[in-house]
Image: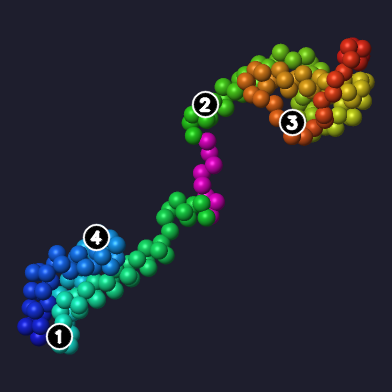
Amino acid sequence: MTASGRELLRRVFLLGYDDLKLRLTRRLGSAELAGDALQDAWIRLERASSIGPVLSPRPYILRIAYNIALKRLRREQGMVTLEEAREALDLVDAAPDPAKVTEARAELVLLRQAAEELTPRQRDILFAVRLDGVPVREIALRYGISERLVALELKQAVLRCSQRVDRKIVQRFGPRFVKVSQKERDE
């Protein structure tokens, strides 16, 4: 490109910058992207060693800036944020925040107190069924009591613990709780 061609592009760029940016903003939908693209176009034109004759400098500059903006948009669409990458790779930190840790520790203290308030048999039944997964039938044989009484003792233990930590009971598995007569309780 001759010095006069470079000067023509510089003049059109400098004198018509606002108009160029406005037109590019309309096409791209972003004034920021248009401004960045025009800046990159200016740098590219200044670094150019040789360009053929330019008959329409304004459309020429707009085309360069528009192509730069499109390339930038394609790159950004292909980029993934750190948060998106963590979610995609399941690297989201599952550790509870300090407030939840403190709350859980306080709840554990309450559960320990509730367990201490249970009768030894209720505590053993609760831990055996809920923590160790021992079948109710086996516990009934161990204590020489009916399965229904084991279920009642378990129910009372769970109710006591849930009341202590102020939680509602949701039965998801385990023996169904049944009503037991006073006679069976005394066994």
Which label sits on residue 31? 4
Q: Earlier in the sequence, mark 1 or mark 4?
A: 4
Q: Name the residue that disc number 1 marks.
A: 55
Q: Residue at x 28, y 68 (%)?
A: 27
Quarter residue 47 falls in: bottom left
Image position, residue 20 (x, y; %): 17, 69
- CA distance for labels 2 and 1: 73 Å
Q: How is the image coloured?
A: rainbow
Determine contact: label 1, label 4, CB under 8 Å.
Answer: no
Q: Secondary structure at mark 1?
A: loop
Q: Name the residue that disc number 2 marks.
A: 102
Q: Residue at x 42, y 65 (%)?
A: 78
Give the residues in magenta. Answer: 89-96
Q: Secondary structure at mark 3?
A: loop
Image position, residue 96 (x, y; %): 52, 36
Position of the C terminus by quadrant:
top right
Quarter residue 127 falls in: top right
